[in-house]
Amino acid sequence: MIPVKGTPAAPAGGSSHTAAPGGDAPQTLPDEGLDDLTPEQLAAQWEEEKPPAAGALANAASSLVVLGVGIGAAILSMAMGLGTPSAPQPGLWPFIISCVMVALGLFQLIAGRHNRDAEKFTRMSTAPLTGLVTLIAMVALMPLIGFELPALVLCVIWMRFLGGETWRSTLVVSASVVIGFYAIFVLALNTSIPHLF
């Protein structure tokens, strides 16, 4: 069926076309954007695009890794010396954080076996491993050369290579963090944390 000139033809295949004035070529209307989607449609789209869920074995493996790292960090912290709350040694705060890691690892191992929110291991899973290796290197170097240079390198690696920040913001924030820690723990509190300067 051929439409009469000047009468708009019905859109075929659901596409949105309108006839231009004077019988010119039809104009295409813009497609719906994400702003036009309902919350239910957005939730369905996110559900389709999210990575595959991890299984019970992957959840248990990740819990054991956290548990092992926490135990290892606690042992290293005790080797650095704990001291007392009134006279803390360099290993006190790492030891407290290690105990929190152990508790979280145990909780996840026991109660998180049926967790469906965890994602399957992918290539992006190496980023936390890189962060862990650099953190262990910082802890190992602190008694030898102080905390300033290892902390600076750690911040640069985490912000630039793991976080994708610009070099300017990476250098400014990293230097600010090291200066802030130095001002608090060395100058203000006069703790015995290993420092170079």
Image (cartoon, rainbow, N blue to C red):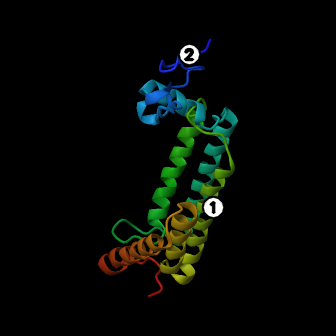
Name the amino acid type tagged 2: Pro
User: From the viewer's perspective, is 21 left or right of 164?
Assistant: left
Q: Earlier in the sequence, mark 2 or mark 1?
A: 2
- The answer to whether residue 142 is above or below residue 52 is below
- Please tell me how crowded label 1 is: few (under 14), some (14-19), or many (20+) other residues with Cα within 10 Å: some
Residue pictured at 46% horizontal, 74% vertical: 168
Report the number of numbered marks. Answer: 2
Residue pictured at 48% horizontal, 18% vertical: 7
Camera-nearest label, 2 or 1 = 2
Residue pictured at 33% horizontal, 74% vertical: 184
In this view, the residue farthest toward the bottom is 197
Percent of width and height locating residue 39: 42, 27
Is residue 66 or residue 82 the one in the foreground? 66
Percent of width and height locating residue 85: 36, 65
Is residue 78 visible from the viewing direction of this image? Answer: no
Percent of width and height locating residue 65: 64, 49
Label 2: element kind? loop
The residue where tag 1 is placed is 130
User: How far, Cα to Cα, is label 2 from label 1?
Assistant: 66 Å
**Disc number at residue 3?**
2
Is residue 148 or residue 121 the one in the foreground? 121
- Please tell me how crowded label 2 is: few (under 14), some (14-19), or many (20+) other residues with Cα within 10 Å: few
Label 1: element kind? helix
Name the amino acid type tagged 1: Thr
